[in-house]
Image (spheres, grey):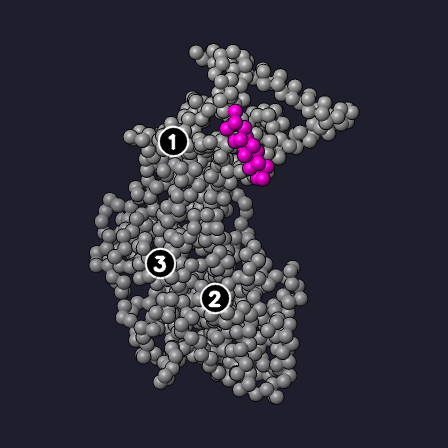
Amino acid sequence: MEPGSGHRSSASLPAASPAHPFQELHAIFPWLVESIFGSLDGVLVGWNLRCLQGRVSPVEYSIAMEFLDPGGPMMKLVYKLQAEDYKFDFPVSYLPGPVKASIQERVLPDSPLYHNKVQFPATGGLGLNLALNPFEYYMFFFALSLITQKPLPGTLHIRTSDCAYFILVDRYLSWFLPTEGSVLPALSSSPGGPNPSPAPRTPTMPFASYGLHHTSLLKRHISHQTSVNADPASHEIWRSETLLQVFVEMWLHHYSLEMYQKLQSPHAKESFTPTEEHVLVVRLLLKHLHAFSNSLKPEQVSPSTHSHATSPLEEFKRAAVPRFVQQKLYLFLQHCFGHWPLDASFRAVLEMWLSYLQPWRYAPEKQAQSSDCQARCVSERWAPFVQENLLMYTKLFVGFLSRALRTDLVSPKNALMVFRVAKVFAQPNLAEMIQKGEQLFLEPELVIPHRQHRLFTAPTFTGSFLSSWPPAVTDASFKVKSHVYSLEGQDCKYTPMFGPEVRTLVLRLAQLITQAKQTAKSISDQCGESTAGRPFLSWLGFCSTDTNGSYAANDLDEMGQDSVRKTDEYLEKALEYLCQMFRLSEAQLTQLTLALGTTQDENGKKQLPDCVVGEDGLVLTPLGRYQIINGLRRFDIEYQGDSELQPIRSYEIASLVRVLFRLSSAINRRFAGPMAALCSRADFLGSFCRYHLTEPGLADRHLLSPVARGCAARRPRGPRLSLRFLGSYRTLLSLLLAFFVASLFCIGPLPCALLLVLGYLLYAVAMTLLTERSKLHHL
């Protein structure tokens, strides 16, 4: 079904309602939803909203956006069916893994989204289903299409923020989670007609308990679903609550605490792997949720000012993030930090995490802030958020350190990620807030900690900084402990972010940053030397070119000097921010840098990777392997085999190289004796022949591999002629250019060839004399 046809049929829905009773609308609704968003098994693509862009397909894009708009024809149909209280079956088998497993085990999931909806199969039925109202059914398909629909071939480079799906998510969030005013009422089904009555809100816990995690430790059996009559005043936000729960469940609830703990095993198989597009959409959700929660008026923020007159929307704003998002987002981020590839695509996960950590960026007062340093200081107003999300800051920071220590920091993209994290955590007053949260969590309790409601006694010990705090500190301590226990379990082992273990990791990262800066400078110097030191005659094909094919294991060579400058700037600022956060002194950095062996030798070049001498030569130590993996040091790799048998290069003509090899091999076999006799002479003719018929530097080459050393000893190479240089594009182009220039001076091909031969003979005589003089000097 095409977007155009869907728009034409929907436009006639209100006018044709007498001819199309609700039973027919009820029958076509699942087909219409599947035609738009695709099937749950991914076989049917639907309208492919994830790849639909306005600049590529403007007509289809405009029709789809108008049809699926929150105030568009499709939503009118949803509300029309909603008013009739229709239900639609949704297979449990397509729900996220933890939810599906819980329902199949006859245990009711924690989210109220599923309460009173599970339908047991009839006799001979095929599996469990959820009975969803039209709005829920539509949103389930919309949210799951981000995961079930795979991108079509040729659409991998589409910018996610320009696609119809991404923009629709933004519109739905702005409509149903407004930052100003209240949620818009459901649209009437016909002009001048009455609004459809809202569907009863899903049975859930009272709004007053939103701020706390569910306190029951007993699993509720699925057969004990109860119908709860919520306050009628809460009906005005049932769509907002449903939208948020659906998005969070479908996009984030792919890992449970038990599953997360199992995934820590190196042999565990991943159950779900998010894509970069998935992460970008989740980041959009988090940014909007921060703006939604921060739109509360100042007098509504403090819990002490709550009154019975507080509207359900205001309560929902206060509870949206801690009640529905926090735990599932934490497990989602933990999985991404531990399993995402060590490449630049992790930037999407990183920015999603940093967006969640900075709710102040989306607060209304941010618009009024000036650009001075004092305005960028994190206000004490955000201390409760930092404390109640302590693990988001501390444990995930440790997870990022572990990733950063395994990446190539010489790469500008990786250096930028380290810079971004260091810059965010170095914001004034943020580190102090995190330290306060850790102190509250580590504060000793006078009763046994438990995840149920606990009674705390204000600390009475003296001589401590805690003694001057008011009794309310124990309440903050309870919140921090509840947060940690609910996310990590009662038996979690907490590692303080500002403790000695993490400080050691930060010092290692500081060392690697210093090394990466030196490596980038060394690579830049080598690139400059190789360009400036290339002899002019090599462009004419008369000097040997680099046939070793060595390259740097990073992207500096591709991006040039500007990349080196960016890398140096990012790493320099990141090191400065880390020193601010963890109070590292310059003396410490210098001492640790020297201890790790990052100093340069007397020639200004990088040392070899850390090695020890074994029976067969040099053997890498664990530190040496680490240095090679991260591009901090490397061996000077050069080809040590038969130069005639090297792989054909990209600058060579393959067929011509093969022909020249056969020709030179035939000549060498035929004249092996005479060439050996000539090279053994002690006069100038012998030196001239040795210069051309023996491989330069072969006798003096240092063979690093003991295997290669043995092979070289078994296969001595005598004098031989090599014509491979004639198979190079550069050599042939130089010859053609010489003949073309000669023709401009009326010199024919034969005289030109004689002049080239004569010129080369003079060059060869000079090089022979210089070579012999150099040998005499070294004797």
Which residue is identified by label 3? 269
Upstream in sequence: badge 2 or badge 1: 2
| Residue type at tag 3 | Lys
Upstream in sequence: badge 3 or badge 1: 3
**Which residue shows up at 32% across the image and 55% down it?**
267
The quarter holding residue 327 reads bottom left
Residue 658 vs 6, above or below: the answer is above
Residue 343 vs 697, above or below: the answer is below
Image position of 36 (left or right of 634): right
- For the N terminus, give its image quadrant: bottom right
Image position of 224 (left or right of 577): left
Q: Is the residue marked by circle 3 packed among few (<14), some (14-19), or many (20+) residues within 10 Å? A: few
Residue 290 vs 565, above or below: the answer is below
Between disc 3 and disc 1, the foreground one is 1
Query: Taking the image as drawn, is residue 47 in sight?
Result: yes
Towards the viewer: 453 or 103: 103
- The x and y percentages for residue 302 are 41, 61
> Is mark 2 in CB contact (under 8 Å) with mark 1?
no
**Which residue shows up at 40% across the image and 37% down it?**
628
SS class, disc 2:
helix
Which residue is identified by label 2? 148
| Residue type at tag 1 | Cys
Q: In this picture, which residue range is highlighted in magenta?
A: 654-671
**Which residue shows up at 53% across the image and 77% down it?**
31
Towards the viewer: 553 or 161: 553
Which residue is identified by label 1? 711
- The x and y percentages for residue 616 are 31, 31
Majority SS type along the magenta span = helix
- The x and y percentages for residue 129 are 40, 77
Towards the viewer: 64 or 720: 720
